[in-house]
Image (cartoon, helix red, strand yellow):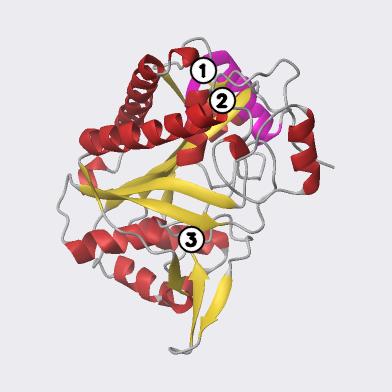
Amino acid sequence: MSKTIIPANYTPALNLYDTQRAIGTVKRLFADTLCATLNLYRVSAPLFLEASTGLNDDLNGVERKVTFDIKDSGTEAQVVQSLAKWKRKALKDYGFRVGKGLYCDMNAIRRDEELDNLHSIYVDQWDWERVITADQRTLEFLKETVRDIVDAVCATSDELRWKFPELKNAISLGREVTFITTQELEDAYPDLTPKQRENAFAKEHGTICIMQIGGKLKSGKPHDGRAPDYDDWALNCDILFWHKPLGCALELSSMGIRVDADALRRQLEAAGCPQRKELPFHKMLLDGTLPLTMGGGIGQSRLCMLLLGKVHVGEVQVSLWDEATVQACKAAGVELL
């Protein structure tokens, strides 16, 4: 059975041709605005990494990576799940200084993703990372950066609606960000699931930032899973917008201030995987070789969905879908790319 839900009164604001034009416009405009806002420079990114380095992202720790052997080198490679750890090493290798950073176009395959309106096995995002100081490892600096990113999203939306007048009534984004921690969210909605809490809070406030994700809450469960070796669970967040066409919260970005040596040790112990300290990346972090950084990923298809008022991610990206999803979209007149 398909998990895809198409609202009964949904009609795309743009046809297929104009949708493709608008996607290109979004990607150009937002990348330029983000770079100017956060002082980022574009670099080339890997599609796969050697498995033994520990540089690939473990996401929630249970997803199966796409793995293959390389004939000539005799090594095992993995298609990236994200570039969270690779970016931090790249900042060191490329000699980036405090206040400057990089971004790249990250493409990934997440084979265990549950397919629905917002989720695909194909992931495309702007992955960014910049060097910070020890004094900037605070919630206030995290909030300041979140506001900068939301401003970049809204500026892109304004320009897009000028270029495509059909979108003027399709979307309306809130520039004001409401911040809340995962524990505050659980306290406010104790009888709801984490996803239901996000929807309830986003419906009320529009644009929200949920902070401190990964550690256990008073209920004994985390709000959501986070790998223990990139974000500091006390200094990370998700940015979500209320997406009126679907009537739900749309997560656009997962980001945070990255672990320092103390946070890494603490979180590896909490996650029950202290042995990761012996991996090359983790050794560099523990001995101070790697810079202090913050960074995140911003979904390209998610942003296009949001700004174009689409109800299925397959309207803005090419991927593979189960037959039930294909038929549900076809019956509702939704054209998948």
Within 10 angstroms of label 1, few (less than 14), some, or many (20 or more) residues? Answer: many
- Nearer the N terminus, badge 1 or badge 3? 3
| Residue underneath mark 1 | 206
Relative image position of residue 86 (x, y in whole percent): 36, 62
Question: Could you tell me residue 162's position as x and y percent?
Answer: 36, 15
* CB within 8 Å, label 3 to label 2: no
Give the secondary structure at mark 1: loop
Residues tagged 1 and 3 counted as in contact (Cβ below 8 A): no
Amino acid type at mark 2: Asn
Which disc, if any, is residue 138? none
Q: Dot 3 lies on which element?
A: loop
Q: Is residue 180 visible?
A: no
The numbered mark at residue 15 is: 2
Q: Residue at x 69, y 28 (%)?
A: 190
Residue 58 horizontal side relative to residue 86, left or right: right
Mark 1 vs 2, N-terminal side = 2
Picture quadrant where residue 154 is located: top left
Give the foreground label among 3 and 2. Answer: 2
Closer to the camera: disc 1 or disc 2?
A: 2
Q: Position of residue 80 (x, y in %)?
A: 48, 62
Residue drawn at x 56%, y 77% is 68
Identify the residue at horizontal 32%, vertical 47% (top origin): 294
Q: Nearer the viewer, residue 185 or 13?
A: 13
Q: Is residue 59 left or right of residue 84?
A: right
SS state under label 2: loop
The main secondary structure of the magenta stretch is helix
The span shown in magenta is 193-210
Q: Earlier in the sequence, mark 3 or mark 2?
A: 2
**Callouts 1 and 2 close, C-beta under 8 Å:** no
User: Does the magenta segment cover residue 69?
Assistant: no
Three-letter amino acid code at the position of disc 1: Gly
**Does residue 9 appear in the picture of this structure?**
yes
